[in-house]
Image (tube, grey):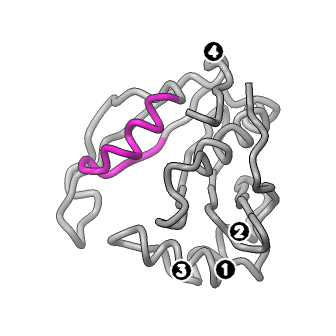
């Protein structure tokens, strides 16, 4: 069951790109470029990008891609000063019903092998490791864990966790 949050979630718009890029650059060692993100958010056919806002500030965003009966989590980022507030959980909770509505049965993603905080978040959503992509983050020479989850059996979580 979702709890009330002080932020609202809406679809990402072009005007949100500067704030998303701030988070990308602050959070990821290999951030996406403006061009890549723009291509992603304007591809509404099989992509879905949403963001959480509080008092006009973009706190975090989530980008997913739908392929057949799978949802691939492309990116999930939260402003460092707003981490541990449940923003990422809210974004994942919000996309789950949309994935089911599109006929998705499974979800997948890659996460840096050293990113234990993200791995714990994904584990709470039913993701489990199924493989390793060697040197996935080539700029920093880090492997990625490949995680999968069954969308249809995962219960909704309490965002306050």
Give the structural element (helix, strand or loop) at label 2.
helix
Q: Is residue 137 magenta?
A: no
Q: Residue furthest top?
A: 153
User: Along the line of sight, which residue is nearer the eye, 98 or 92?
Assistant: 92
Q: CA gap, disc 4 to disc 3?
A: 35 Å
Viewer-nearest of discs 3 and 1: 3
Q: Is residue 47 left or right of residue 4?
A: left
Horizontally, residue 84 falls left or right of residue 17, namely: left
Instruction: Give the CA separation, mark 1 to mark 4.
Output: 34 Å
Q: Nearer the viewer, residue 105 or 8?
A: 8
Query: Label 2: which residue?
Result: 41
Vertical position of residue 54 compared to residue 134: above or below: below
* Structural distance between the alpha carbons of marks 2 and 1: 9 Å
**Disc 3: which residue:** 22
Instruction: Please provide the residue range marked out in magenta.
Output: 109-124
Q: Position of residue 149 (x, y in %)?
A: 51, 27
Residue bearing mark 4: 153
Q: Earlier in the sequence, mark 3 or mark 1?
A: 1
Q: Earlier in the sequence, mark 1 or mark 4?
A: 1
């Amino acid at each position: 069951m979702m709890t009330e949050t002080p932020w609202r979630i809406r679809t990402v718009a072009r005007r949100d790109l500067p704030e998303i890029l701030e988070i990308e650059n602050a959070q990821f060692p290999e951030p996406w470029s403006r061009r890549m993100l723009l291509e992603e958010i304007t591809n509404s056919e099989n992509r879905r990008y949403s963001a959480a806002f509080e008092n006009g500030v973009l706190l975090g965003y989530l980008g997913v891609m739908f392929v057949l009966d799978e949802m691939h989590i492309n990116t999930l980022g939260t402003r460092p000063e707003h981490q541990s507030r449940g923003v990422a959980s809210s974004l994942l909770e919000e996309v789950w019903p949309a994935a089911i509505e599109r006929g998705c049965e499974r979800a997948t993603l890659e996460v840096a092998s050293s990113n234990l905080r993200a791995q714990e978040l994904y584990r709470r959503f039913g993701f489990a490791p199924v493989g390793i992509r060697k040197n996935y983050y080539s700029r920093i020479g880090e492997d990625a864990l490949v995680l999968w989850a069954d969308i249809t059996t995962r219960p909704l979580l309490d965002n306050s966790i």
